Image (cartoon, helix red, strand yellow):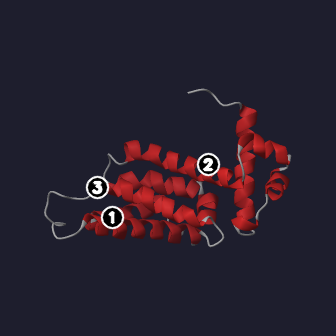
Amino acid sequence: MAKIDRRIAKTQEALRRAVVELMNQKSFDEITIQDIADQADLNRGTIYLHYKDKYDLLDKMIESHMEELGELDEWACKLDWNNGLVPFFEYFEKNHLFFSTMLASKGAPSFRARLLEYVMAGFNGEIDRESGKNKDLNEDVMLQYTGTAYVGIVEWWIINGMPYPPETMAKQVGVLLERSL
């Protein structure tokens, strides 16, 4: 994997931060490329060196977070629910501004759907098919139920100022998911 130039990484981070900050003030549709450039203290042309438009920038931001969550999946899902969920809640906590913005009403409407799709795909491999506890349940209903519950609790936790530490959330949500899946 080629190492990215630090100046490029710094510029892209400034642009991502600018979009999130602006989305806390107004809806994404109201934000212009000039707004982003001004907020990031960059030239409009610089944005177009990195992204096709503001939608491309937003999509790349979301994709970057989905990839990072996917990297956590590779090892965290091998743990039990309580321990496996801790890194996810720590990630949400570390990136709370992004997630609170994306999950808020002024956020990107497609983000919640993308997060739900990601979560449901991950839970698909976790359904207990052996013990018989889920024998009369349809998998698509189970995935929709648990995925929606998980995204909802993450949203609640972030929007309410993360009232419990990640470890507590992981333990509580882990118990609930184990009961459901």
134 to 63, vertically: above or below: below
Picture residue at 51% right of the left edge, 46% below the top: 67
Q: Earlier in the sequence, mark 3 or mark 2?
A: 2
Picture residue at 18% right of the left edge, 58% below the top: 129
Q: Could you say which disc has been placed on residue 60 in the image?
A: 2
Q: Is residue 101 left or right of residue 89?
A: right
Kindly report which numbered mark, 3 or 2, lies closer to the viewer in this rendering. 2
The amino acid on which the numbered mark 3 sits, given as a three-letter code, is: Glu
| Whole-number angstrom distance, CA of label 3 to CA of label 1 | 10 Å
Quarter placement of the N terminus: top right
Quarter placement of the C terminus: bottom left
Q: Is residue 123 visible?
A: yes
Q: What residue is shown with label 1?
A: 143
Q: Crowding near pointer 2: few (<14 within 10 Å), some, many (20+)?
A: some
Q: Nearer the viewer, residue 26 or 14?
A: 26
Percent across and percent down for residue 40 are: 80, 51
Q: Is residue 126 left or right of residue 120?
A: left
Hey, which quadrant is residue 85 in on the image? Answer: bottom left
Percent across and percent down for residue 164 are: 50, 67
106 to 82, vertically: above or below: below
Q: Nearer the viewer, residue 35 or 71?
A: 35
The amino acid on which the numbered mark 1 sits, given as a three-letter code, is: Leu
Hey, which quadrant is residue 167 in on the image? Answer: bottom left
Q: What residue is shown with label 3?
A: 126
The amino acid on which the numbered mark 2 sits, given as a three-letter code, is: Lys
128 to 159, vertically: above or below: above
Picture residue at 64% right of the left edge, 60% below the top: 97
